[in-house]
Image (tube, rainbow, N blue to C red):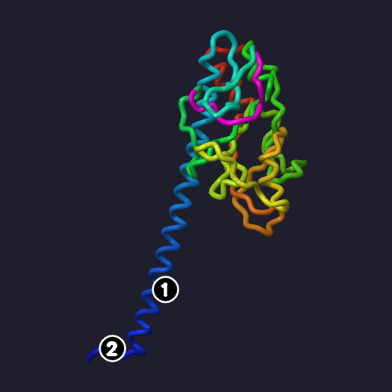
Amino acid sequence: MGFSLVELAIVLVIVSLLLGGMFISLGTQSEMRAAAEERKQTDDLIEALLGYAASRPGKPYLPCPDTDGDGVGNRNSANCTAYEGGVPWIDLGVGRVDAWDNRLRYRVTEAFAIDTGFGLATKGTLRVCRAQACAGPDILGSELPAVIVSYGRNGRGATSESGNVNGGPGASDVDELENLDNDNDFVAHPPTTAGSPGGEFDDVVVWLSGNILANRMIAAGRLP
């Protein structure tokens, strides 16, 4: 016996709901894979920074940021021309863009990038916090030598692979804005939606600890 029109309509509705759920699930899985890929990439970048420092002649030092988009850190004599810019991907032997095809951001403490080298007593000036206010228990890391930022799926404020600057976060998205203001403080926490206390946020932020850097240089025989 064939389906009635009512039964057929019900079947079509159920199939549509199932397909819709599957497509949403596939989209979510794709975003999860991209986020996991980006986390691995940024972690690999920290390893690349450690390798770069250990391979310098004389005392170890970190690369300068890339300020002109050619993948090479920009240095003026012993010092960097700027202490925040793009990741010097050619210097580090890593990929140029993140999982969403935007360039990664890199900030380094001046004392760690001078080509005369750093020592065990050298202190970083960078901080990473859970919130824009960056106070008390919200501080995740301080006195950091270097920080790397991917601006996430929304890519707000990032520079695209072609060199175009994307539109920035809204005025209420203070946590993402903190990662764009060229100061020593950065924000890192799980993604949040618009209307959250710090606004919409999906940046991926990793940092190089001063202790890890010192220990790796000691293990490599580069310090003290």
Q: For this rendering, which residue is in front, 77 or 50?
A: 77
Q: Residue at x 64, y 12 (%)?
A: 77
Residue 181, by quadrant, is: top right
Please give the range of residues in magenta: 78-90
SS at mark 2 in the image: loop
**Could you tell me residue 220's position as x and y percent?**
52, 16
* Label 2 crowd bin: few (<14), some (14–19), many (20+), radius 10 Å: few
Amino acid type indicated by mark 2: Phe
Question: Does residue 113 appear anywhere in the picture?
Answer: yes
Q: For this rendering, which residue is in front, 194 or 81?
A: 81
The residue labelled by disc 1 is 17
Q: Residue at x 45, y 63 (%)?
A: 24
Q: Quadrant of the N terminus?
A: bottom left
**Could you tell me residue 91's position as x and y percent?**
50, 22
* Residue 3 badge: 2
The earlier-in-sequence mark between 1 and 2 is: 2
